[in-house]
Image: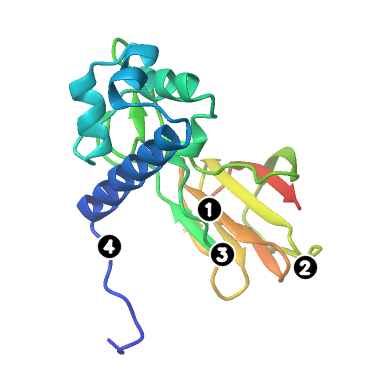
Amino acid sequence: MSSQETQPTSAADVDDGRRQAVAQRLKARRLEKGLSINELARQAGVAKSNLARLEAGDGNPSLETLWALSDALGINVREMIEPQAAGLRLVPAPQGTDFQQGLDAQAEAARFGVTLLSTCPAGAMRDLYRAAFEPGPARLSEPHAEGTVEHVILLSGKARVGPVGTAKILGPGDYVTFAANTQHIYEALEAGTTAIVVMEYR
């Protein structure tokens, strides 16, 4: 491995990084609003001890808790759990049978969870498509305008998607996003491949 290559990040590192990011954003928004922990906990209907743990990066908030805190702070919930932007980013579908694996937040009383895959930048527009493609010649897409970003969630089958030379192989549930101002491909590797494609224009 060359000195320029990075070591792979473990799932534990990713989870800890996400908790710390939520903690930092939560505390920053609370201070911006001039609220004490006691007051924010009261307004959100959240136990003060739970809120303190969240701000320390030790908590694992439920979906209801994040929504309650966001409402109390007058912000969108995405501001607290927004992932870091990347030029080419792949989010694999959760593996195995662990319901909570790979989720950003879970509901308290129902088997319902969410993972924030992407936020929409201010001023951006997005179009939503359902795509179906079969094995054979790959669909080669010419570069779009500067600032265009594509988001792809594979629904079924298997496909190679992304910029030429760095395209990713996707299975059902996998998500990839990339800057679309270079040539990119959509290549079905199995019959019956379908996907949701979101085009983002800035």
Q: Secondary structure at mark 1?
A: strand
Is 65 drawn above or below residue 10 in the view shown? above
Q: Residue 184: image x %, image y %? A: 67, 66
Q: Which residue is mark 2?
A: 143
State the CA–CA distance, disc 4 to disc 3. Answer: 17 Å
**Residue at the far bottom in the pictured view:** 2
Q: Quadrant of the N terminus?
A: bottom left
Distance from disc 2 to disc 3, alpha carbons, whole Å, reads 15 Å
Q: Amino acid at mark 4?
A: Thr
- Determine contact: label 3, label 1, CB under 8 Å: no
Query: What is the x, y in percent for residue 197?
Result: 66, 44
Q: Could you tell which of marks 4 and 1 lies nearer the N-terminus?
A: 4
* SS state under label 3: loop
133 left or right of 169 in image: right
The answer to whether the residues at label 4 and label 1 have Cβ atoms under 8 Å apart is: no
3 or 1: tag closer to the N-terminus: 3
Q: Residue at x 21, y 24 (%)?
A: 50
> Residue 9's mark?
4
User: In terms of depth relative to the viewer, which is nearer, 60 or 73?
Assistant: 73
Q: Is residue 97 visible?
A: no
Q: CA distance from mark 4 to mark 2?
A: 31 Å
- For the residue marked with disc 2, what is the amino acid? Pro
Res. 183 image quadrant: bottom right
Label 3 and label 1: CA atoms lie apart by 10 Å
Disc 4 versus disc 1: nearer the observer: 4
Q: What residue sits right under mark 3 in the picture?
A: 87
Dot label at residue 74: none
Which residue is the site of mark 1? 176
**Which of the two residues, 184 or 29, is positioned nearer the viewer here?**
29
Q: Earlier in the sequence, mark 2 or mark 1?
A: 2
